[in-house]
């Protein structure tokens, strides 16, 4: 789960990390009220969306009067902001964060991530802050410093100090950075985060360190024990198809094609998406119904996929081990009875109870297209798309 910048800043400030003074606003009036509350004569109005790259997309505006703040706020609020990290639809700006402007002398990059290859938490830092980490890796690879953290010992002060010196900071700032690194790591561990990113962490004109931007993601599987984090969820930032599926316990990823997929097992789902592509089509989603799926679960999955207006064809591909083809077949038949299925449905069943499953489909009298193999199923799904779509 992702959270907003202002929420991440509040959490990190709780661990002692310095952040600019700021306040949340839902309207232009509130935004200028916040500025008055903060005081000073320069402010930053920042769109709160679950994405970086807001600066270059017009989602971060420096203002020096209340009129400018109100203008910036009414430009942003209620609009969808498209950044290079969002899809082409962008994300809805429903909240703004107004901050005192910071005088920047230098921008640093600081990230804490899970490195799955080494099975460790990794601290990453660079003196080329402001840029995205992918760009730093390409354009300034030598500036990237990494520390792999031993899970038993945690981040050690000498490691943090080495990193601080490695960034070329003068000795006055080294201790401050060490505190920030230690605190970020503590926040990461305490809150079951999967990512903490402070980009930029800035050296100010008065030689202080301030987290100017902050991003945090959390382990979904640990949210049950982090109620104060779960509360921060903002559904307006999520793909509605994905949140509907998550609420039903289904692993779902929305994509941009028109062939709806319902598959068991992540590996088979990936293979099926490849086969659809090979046959000249494009999947509308990734959906793993998991093992031992009951007819009710299959029905739920159908409802989620059909809820996507892009879907023009439905492909069910089951290689049953723990699953039972007869249950899946029953679920498909129930979907036809209970939902308004107006599109071609291709079903390929294989494995446990396959004969019973095929019998249920055959005897249902429903216009279900069946296939024996994965390749055949993918080809039939692509061929079954409405002709106008095929031309497009
Ligand atoms: P992002 O584009 O979504 O990552 O948003 P950031 O919060 O990182 O802001 C993007 C850029 O805007 C930063 O890298 C800064 O260069 C600039 N910026 C943000 N806040 C301030 C500020 O208070 N003062 C100044 N001078 N620049 C700022
Ligand atoms: Mn940033």
Image: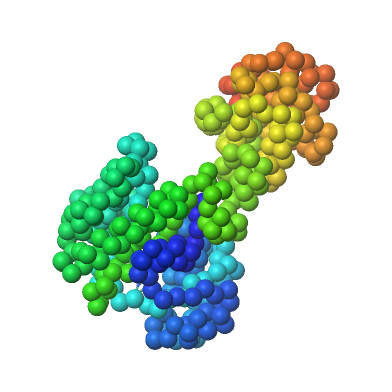
Q: How is the image coloured?
A: rainbow
At x 50%, y 81%, the residue is 34
Label total for image = 0
Q: Residue at x 57, y 62 (%)?
A: 92
Which quadrant of the view contains residue 215?
bottom left
Tell me where residue 19 appears, x and y as whole percent: 38, 70
Q: Is residue 201 visible?
A: yes
Residue 62 visible in the displayed image: no
Q: In the image, what residue occupies the spot 33% across and 63% down?
A: 200
Q: In the shown orientation, is residue 153 left or right of residue 219?
A: left
Left or right: residue 311 versus residue 342 is left
User: Is 320 on the left or on the right of 299, as rendered?
Assistant: left
Q: Residue at x 71, y 32 (%)?
A: 298
Percent of width and height locating residue 286: 57, 37
Expressed as whole percent of the image width and height from the top left, the position of residue 276 reads 56, 30
Vertical arrangement, residue 3 with respect to residue 267, above or below: below
> On the rendered image, what quadrant is the C terminus found in?
top right
Most distant residue in the top direction: 355
* Viewer-closest of 199 and 148: 148
| Residue 339, quarter of the rendered image | top right
Q: Position of residue 311 (x, y in %)?
A: 67, 41
* Rendered position, 270 above or below 72: above
């Amino acid at each position: 789960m992702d959270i907003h910048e202002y929420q991440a800043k509040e959490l990190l400030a709780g661990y002692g990390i310095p952040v600019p003074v700021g306040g949340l606003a839902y309207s232009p009036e509130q935004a200028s009220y916040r500025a008055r509350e903060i005081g000073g004569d320069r402010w930053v109005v920042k769109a709160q969306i679950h994405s970086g790259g807001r600066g270059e997309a017009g989602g971060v505006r420096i203002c020096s009067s209340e009129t400018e703040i109100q203008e910036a706020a009414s430009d942003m609020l209620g609009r969808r902001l498209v950044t290079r990290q969002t899809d082409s639809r962008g994300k809805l700006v429903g909240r703004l964060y107004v901050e005192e402007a910071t005088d920047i002398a230098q921008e640093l990059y600081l990230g804490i991530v899970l490195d799955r290859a080494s099975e460790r938490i990794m601290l990453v830092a660079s003196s080329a802050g402001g840029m995205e980490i992918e760009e730093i890796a390409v354009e300034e690879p030598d500036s990237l410093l990494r520390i792999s953290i031993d899970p038993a010992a945690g981040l050690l002060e000498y490691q943090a100090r080495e990193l601080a010196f490695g960034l070329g900071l003068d000795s006055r700032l080294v201790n401050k950075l060490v505190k920030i690194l230690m605190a970020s790591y503590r926040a990461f561990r305490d809150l079951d985060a999967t990512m903490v990113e402070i980009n930029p962490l800035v050296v100010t004109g008065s030689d202080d360190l301030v987290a100017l931007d902050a991003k945090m993601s959390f382990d979904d599987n640990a949210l049950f024990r982090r109620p104060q984090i779960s509360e921060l969820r903002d559904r307006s930032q999520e793909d509605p198809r994905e949140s509907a599926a998550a609420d039903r316990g289904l692993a779902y990823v929305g994509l941009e094609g028109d062939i709806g997929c319902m598959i068991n097992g992540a590996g088979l789902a990936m293979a099926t998406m490849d086969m659809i592509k090979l046959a000249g089509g494009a999947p509308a989603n990734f959906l793993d119904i998991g093992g031992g799926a009951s007819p009710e679960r299959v029905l739920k999955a159908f409802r989620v996929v059909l809820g996507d207006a892009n879907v023009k064809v439905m492909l069910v591909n089951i290689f049953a081990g723990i699953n039972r083809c007869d249950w899946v077949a029953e679920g498909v038949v129930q979907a036809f009875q209970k939902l308004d299925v107006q599109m071609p449905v291709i079903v390929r069943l294989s494995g446990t109870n396959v004969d019973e499953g095929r019998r249920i489909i055959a005897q249902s009298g429903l216009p279900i297209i069946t296939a024996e193999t994965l390749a055949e199923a993918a080809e039939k799904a692509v061929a079954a798309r409405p002709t106008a779509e095929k031309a497009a």
